[in-house]
Image: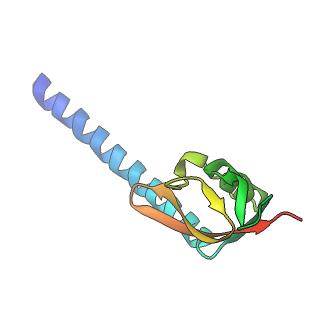
Amino acid sequence: MTATDSNRKIVEQERQAHLRKEAHLKGEAEDLCKLLTGVTITIAQKAGEQDQLFGSVTAKDVADALAAKNFTIDRRKIQLDEPIKQLGEFKVPVRLHKDVVAEVTLIVTKEE
């Protein structure tokens, strides 16, 4: 066996290990997606006259609300194009894996 053959074998083993790990991570993400789909979180914020928020709801706020329901999600995986600045119901995509996105319902209510 030459050095080149040995290197090819090592590279192939590493590639196979990477593919197994990726499949495992994707499987875990799909399981979490099933759990997250249909989850509704409510965040109460101070709001003014036309239901405009004083401040905004950010990905960190969403991550904290999910943590309160025992879902540990990195805020960077929460795909808010921009912070939410008004009351209402919103669908928030959560990218769990490059091929797996769950959608969480977020309800922003007026803080009493």
Relative to 6, say whether 97 is above or below: below
How has the structure been colored for display? rainbow
Point out residue 94 in the picture as x, y percentages from the top left corner: 53, 60
Can I make out residue 1 in this image?
no
Is residue 36 found left or right of 108 in the rendered image? left
Query: In which quadrant of the rendered image does the N terminus lie?
Result: top left
In the figure, residue 7 lies in which quadrant? top left
Point out residue 87 in the picture as x, y percentages from the top left corner: 69, 67
Point out residue 82 in the picture as x, y percentages from the top left corner: 53, 53
Relative to 1, say whether 68 is above or below: below
In the figure, residue 5 lies in which quadrant? top left
Q: Nearer the viewer, residue 105 or 102?
A: 105
Q: Residue at x 18, y 29 (%)?
A: 6
Looking at the image, which residue sits at the far right? 112
Q: Nearer the viewer, residue 25 or 95?
A: 95
Can I make out residue 4 in this image?
yes
Q: Residue at x 77, y 61 (%)?
A: 48
Q: Residue at x 58, y 73 (%)?
A: 37
Is residue 32 found left or right of 99 in the rendered image? right
Relative to 24, say whether 91 is above or below: below
In the figure, residue 43 lies in which quadrant? bottom right
Point out residue 68 in the picture as x, y percentages from the top left corner: 78, 58
Is residue 71 found left or right of 25 in the rendered image? right
Query: In which quadrant of the rendered image does the C terminus lie?
Result: bottom right
Total residue callouts: 0
Looking at the image, which residue sits at the far top? 3
Looking at the image, which residue sits at the far bottom? 38
Q: Nearer the viewer, residue 93 or 18?
A: 93
